[in-house]
Amino acid sequence: MIKIAITKGRIEKQVCKMLQEAGLDMDPIINKDRELLIETSDGISMIFAKSNDVLTFLEHGIVDVGFVGKDTLDDSDFNDYYEMLDLDIGKCYFAVAAYPEYKTKEFTRRKRIASKYTKVAKDYFSAKQEDVEIIKLEGSVELGPVVGLSDAIVDIVETGSTLKANGLEIIEKISDVSTRMIVNKVSLKFKKDEVFQLIDILKGE
Ligand code: PRP
């Protein structure tokens, strides 16, 4: 039995579809109601969790494998896992975005940056040796510049429509994001065959 924690919602749907297309019996999962743990006839035990909680379950050895976005990995201090596979789905990227004036504006105070991803924002500006104030927002981060809370944002961009609709533009792209398969280091030792079998299935091999 391989234990998996998967990010609820889009990642769950896309990964389960990939596993189904590869021939695994995913019916109990695809047709589930509100159950949070499901075991399949192929020896998969899957739990459905919020992205950050996928890391918590993996960190505590509750699951062997996690499916999570690179955005969650990049914004977490937890790094005691192996990243095994880029599933090439859920593709988007981190970027700094602001009103066009941001590029030429002379700041006489610390810049204010709104983000849901405070670690990503902090790491980005630290690498540039820029001392900025990071303001945490839980969502609709574009509101930061729109209401005058922040000078810029660090956020995920997929189609760019949200930025465009709010008059914002990309100042700099930071890094790519997509869905990743991660593995608990101990599990890789003791369930190596199961883990690599799952990787082969997802790679279509
Ligand atoms: C994400 C992200 C942007 C938007 C980008 O937000 O934070 O706001 O999607 O997508 P786009 O480039 O295709 O417009 P999400 O919809 O997940 O909700 P949130 O703002 O509440 O986090």
Image (cartoon, helix red, strand yellow):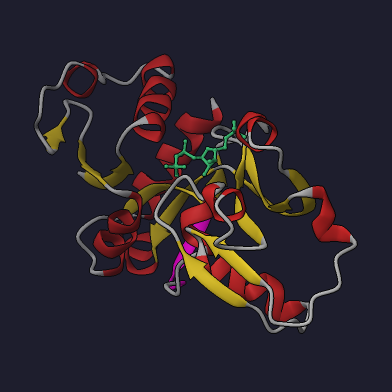
Does residue 98 sit above or below 163 in this rendering? below
Is residue 89 covered in magenta?
no
From the image, which quarter does the N terminus lie in?
top left
How many numbered circles does the render carry? 0
* Residue 91 sits in quarter: top right
| Horizontal and vertical percent position of residue 166 | 64, 36
Magenta span: 79-83
Q: Nearer the viewer, residue 126 or 41?
A: 126
Q: Quadrant of the C terminus?
A: top right
The overriding secondary structure of the stretch rendered in magenta is strand
* Residue 110 spot, x, y in % from top left: 68, 81
Left or right, residue 184 beside residue 140: left
Observer-nearest of 149 and 204: 149
Residue 205 visible, this angle? no
Question: Which residue is at 47% across, 58% downward?
Answer: 116
In the rendered structure, the answer to whether residue 127 lies left or right of residue 103 reads left
- In-image side of 103 versus 20 (left or right): right
